């Protein structure tokens, strides 16, 4: 699954394939291999191109890489394309939020019929010992929840639809 990652003011297309603690990453169509050396929740050490990177997640929009701070934002590439091509119709259409990588559903924060706002937390998925809050890509109403607490999901599985 591809994402658009904004770091400070630069945008990158990132596609991540996970194999245990190793990742194959396409960064703007350049292939990179990464290995997770350690992962302590909000702190992670990666080994990429013979270099270690200590990453600390300050909050959902701020990270520190080797003691340098960066503002970050991540958007699913399909949602980005949809919003870019037709903002008016995107607000009316159903959007399905998918799992970004294999993981475990830890908590579902909404129920079918709930009104949600763009960037509102809707679900927590645990992947590689890190809990990731899935957020609503738009204002809308929760139409369908496809998963249950404690369920294991694969990358790309449908989690929730918002209309």
Image: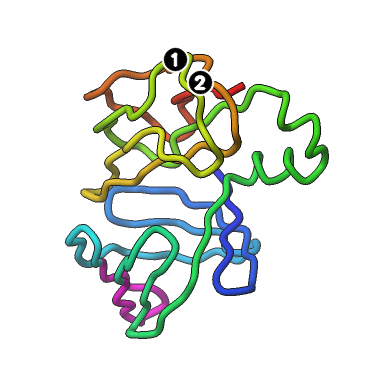
Q: Is residue 47 magenta?
A: yes
The single residue placed furthest to the bottom in the displayed view is 67
Q: Residue at x 29, y 76 (%)?
A: 54
For the C terminus, which image quadrant? top right
Q: Position of residue 32 (x, y in %)?
A: 49, 66
Q: Residue at x 32, y 64 (%)?
A: 35
Q: Is 159 situated left or right of 3 in this image?
A: left
Determine whether 124 is above or below 75 in the image: above
Q: Position of residue 96 (x, y in %)?
A: 56, 26
Helix, strand or loop for disc 1: loop
- Mark 1 or mark 2: which comes first in sequence? 1
Determine whether 151 is above or below 154 in the image: above
Mark drawn on residue 112: 1
Residue 8 occupies quadrant: bottom right
Report the front residue among 148 and 49. Answer: 148
Q: Is residue 135 magenta?
A: no
The answer to whether the residue labelled 1 contacts the one labelled 2, judged by CB atoms less than 8 Å apart, is: yes
Determine whether 131 is above or below 89 in the image: below
Q: Position of residue 53 (x, y in %)?
A: 33, 77
For the N terminus, which image quadrant? top right
Report the front residue among 17 and 81. Answer: 81
Magenta part of the chain:
44-55
Q: Is 73 situated left or right of 33 in this image?
A: right
Q: Residue at x 32, y 66 (%)?
A: 57
Dominant secondary-structure state across the stretch colored magenta: strand
Count of residue discs: 2
Q: Residues within 10 Å of mark 1 (few under 14, many from 20)?
A: few
Q: Residue at x 32, y 38 (%)?
A: 125
Helix, strand or loop for disc 2: strand
Q: Which residue is mark 2?
A: 142
Report the front residue among 2 and 134. Answer: 134
């Amino acid at each position: 699954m591809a994402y658009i990652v904004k770091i400070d003011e630069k945008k990158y297309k990132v596609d991540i394939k996970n194999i245990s603690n190793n990742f194959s990453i396409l960064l703007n169509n350049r292939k990179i291999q990464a290995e997770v050396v350690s992962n302590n929740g909000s702190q992670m050490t990666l080994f990429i191109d013979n270099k270690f990177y200590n990453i600390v997640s300050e909050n959902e929009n701020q990270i520190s890489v080797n003691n340098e701070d960066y503002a970050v934002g991540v958007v699913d590439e399909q949602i980005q394309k949809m919003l870019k091509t037709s903002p008016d119709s995107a607000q009316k259409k159903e959007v399905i939020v998918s799992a970004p990588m294999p993981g475990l559903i830890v908590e579902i924060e909404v129920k079918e019929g709930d009104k949600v706002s763009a960037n509102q937390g809707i679900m927590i998925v645990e992947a590689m010992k890190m809990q990731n809050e899935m957020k609503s890509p738009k204002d809308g109403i929760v139409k369908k929840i496809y998963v249950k607490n404690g369920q294991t999901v694969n990358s790309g599985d449908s989690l929730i639809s918002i209309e």
